[in-house]
Image (cartoon, grey):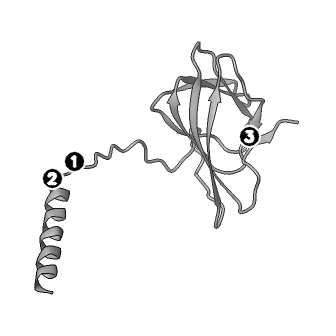
Amino acid sequence: MKKIALFTAALLANSIAHAADAPKVDVQPVARVNTTVTGQPIVVPEKPDVLVSIATFPPGARLPEHQHPHPHYVYVLEGVLTVVNTQTNTTFDVKAGDFVVEMQDTWHYGINNGSVPVKLLVIDQVPAGAKNNLVPRP
């Protein structure tokens, strides 16, 4: 029994020593925001479902004009996406490494005007059971 206890103690000490030698995790903050890209406060539905997806826009691809009734977060993994706000007739580009909280209840669309695909990590917070967070323009 004494041998088992000594073996266990040695194994535990060895594991702790290796953990101390392990590489450290590097955390780089990407963003901290409390408003959308147009300055609207972010209002999260009570007890939301979180929808996470990857959207890929081939060169020339465009979403139809739409709006988001709930928070819509986008992190650009690859490429450059042009966002067109059709209510204000303004545009802005988001590129790889950018994070944006899109405007809510505002008509807009995204288009890939570049020659390489655009890849986005998209996170939506919607009321429980909602299918999605996109309302197409009628």
From this viewpoint, which residue is outermost toward the top?
115
For the point 63% across and 35% down, which residue is it? 55
Pick the residue in front: 66 or 26.
26
| Residue 138 sits above or below residue 110 on the image | below
> Which residue was labeled with disc 3?
67
Residue occupying image coordinates x 28% and y 49%: 25
Q: Is residue 42 left or right of residue 5?
A: right
Residue occupied by mark 2: 21
Residue 81 horizontal/vertical position (percent): 59, 25
- Which residue is located at x 52 percent, y 33 percent? 76
Query: Which residue is disc 1 drawn over?
Result: 23
- Against 131, residue 8 (above or below) is below
Q: Is residue 60 left or right of residue 119?
A: right
- Which amino acid type is marked by label 1? Pro
Which quadrant is the N terminus positioned in? bottom left
| Classed neighbour count for the residue bearing mark 1: other residues with Cα under 10 Å, few (<14), some (14–19), many (≥20) | few
- Number of other residues with Cα within 10 Å of mark 3, as a class: few under 14, some 14 to 19, many 20 or more: many
Element type where label 3 sits in the image: strand
Distance, label 3 to label 1, CA atoms, is 44 Å
* Type of amino acid at the residue the image marks with label 2: Asp
Estimate the x, y position of residue 32 in percent, counting from the top left. Answer: 43, 48
Q: Quadrant of residue 138?
A: top right
For the residues marked 2 and 1, what is the alpha-carbon distance in whole angstroms? 7 Å
Tell whether label 3 touches label 2 (CB within 8 Å). no
114 or 93, which is in the foreground?
A: 114
